[in-house]
Image: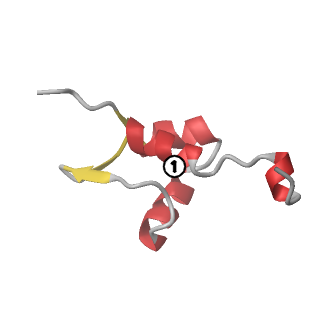
Amino acid sequence: MERIECLSSKLLARRWGLSPSTLERWRHRRQGPPHLKIGGRVRYRLQDIEAFEAARVEHANAERGQA
């Protein structure tokens, strides 16, 4: 079976420069990336984190209505 790489809330918070409580708030509001809860522990799959990041990439020209 393929092993899926996951990050804890603490590691994801460090990656993004946020506090773990911000991620917790996002989970309750269903705003952040998808997460798993296994044995009472929250984990984020790396593929979900990267997809969440990619969906939020902003390009300066696109913001001005220029392509």
Q: Residue at x 59, y 50 (%)?
A: 19
Residue located at (49% from left, 59% from top): 32
From the top left corner, tell me how far across and down residue 51 is, in percent: 48, 45
Quarter of the figure with residue 34: bottom left
In the image, is 49 to the left or to the right of 61? left
Image location of residue 11, percent across then percent down: 48, 36
Q: Is residue 40 above or below residue 46?
A: below
Farthest front residue in view: 67
What residue is rendered at 85% in x and 60% in y? 65
Residue at left 18%, top 49%? 39
Residue that numbered label 1 is attached to:
52
Tell me the SS state at disc 1.
helix
In the picture as drawn, the residue positioned furthest to the top comes out as: 2
Residue density around tag 1, few if under 14, some if 14–19, many if 20 or more, within 10 Å: some
Residue 41 coordinates in the image, percent (x, y): 28, 49
Rendered position, 25 above or below 49: below
Locate the N terminus by quadrant. top left
Q: Position of residue 25 (x, y in %)?
A: 51, 65
The residue lying toward the viewer, choosing from 32 and 57, is 57
Type of amino acid under label 1: Phe
